[in-house]
Image (tube, rainbow, N blue to C red):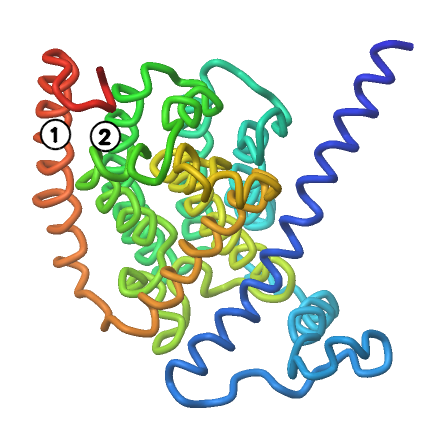
Amino acid sequence: MEALRYLITTVVLILIIVIPLMLCVAYLTYAERKIIGYMQVRIGPNRVNFWSALPIISKWRGFGQPIADAVKLMFKEIVIPSNANRFLFVIAPMLVMAPALAAWAVIPFADGWVLSDINAGLLYILAMTSIGVYGVIIAGWASNSKYAFLGALRSAAQIVSYEIAMGFALVGVLMAAGSLNLGEIIAAQQGSVLHWFWLPLLPLFIVYFISGVAETNRAPFDVAEGESEIVAGFHVEYSGMLFAVFFLAEYANMILIAALATIMFLGGWLSPFQGIPYIEDLFSWVPGIFWFFAKVSIFLFFFLWIRATFPRYRYDQIMRLGWKVFIPITLVWIVVLGLLILMKLPPWFA
């Protein structure tokens, strides 16, 4: 009976995380189209509304667009190429989506608000985010299309390249915090915004975020897909909900990268005014989960801003940036960081 109660509780907690996450993924697509539309002086989606159902948001033109897109994709036919490996073709999108959702098991939303508070949380995150590349390779290979296979190889090479730089950046966080537990990493950043890890680990912070943009195949690093100009790369043969799952995984990974950057470098749920006299008391009523989601939203805005601003890189430029720039920077800064910790010079590591 106790085991059954534990199972039911765990399933309920998983749904509490997954359902809002899927809504956030859906409306991140709406936010992207609206924000980039405003940046490019155009309207964006403005037709599908919830006029009668939700009159409060009747002025938010196009607010029902993600729901309409989801319903449309549910009813579209899933076409599987005749010579494709049917099992792998269907399972590949799930292999991309599952790690993006499973990684949230160790993400702390506020003090004590975490599904599984394991000591090796950072190692678990690295393991989960590394699995998604298998789905990309399998999708390209199982499609039995040379175009899809070449796109899969290019995407996989890009993801693996930038995962190395991201891993080294997280090594710096591990050294600074002295723990693999995500809650303890946040606790090590107690204090105001000047005490968070973004300042002593600034090069690693920049490398981590740009690598996150590249790993999620977002512009300007989306040359392997280039969905606005070419057909789509490794998922060119996909349609219907199988196609939608790839894009759900992409946006879920964007939110995950933003959440990890918040935890590792911006103090997670900690208030930016912590430790500042008078101002701290003024904002003491704000819950930690609000600060967490506010910081995540800022990172997601930068994802969209970058897409609207920068032209696409050539593939050789993308790989050069990962191997010849980011990896050497992270290695050098890890050595510098080790010396700073050894000599206990800055106040963050004293």
Give the residue type at disc 2.
Phe
Specify the farthest residue to the front. 278
Say whether residue 130 is visible. no
Q: Which residue is mark 2?
A: 168
Residue, disc 1: 331
Question: Camera-side residue: 173 or 273?
Answer: 273
Q: Which of the two labelled residues, at mark 1 and mark 2, occupies the earlier sequence position?
A: 2
Placement of 114 over or under 55, stated as above or below? above
- 1 and 2 marks in contact (CB < 8 Å): yes
Where residue 132 sits, quadrant-wise, is top left
Question: x and y percent of residue 273 in the render?
Answer: 42, 41
Residue 220 in which image quadrant:
bottom left
The residue lying at 33 percent from left, 34 percent from top is: 196
The C terminus lies in quadrant? top left
Name the residue nearer the viewer: 342 or 259: 342
Whether residue 247 is visible: yes
The residue depicted at 45 percent of the width and 82 percent of the height is 37
Q: Residues within 10 Å of mark 1 (few under 14, many from 20)?
A: some
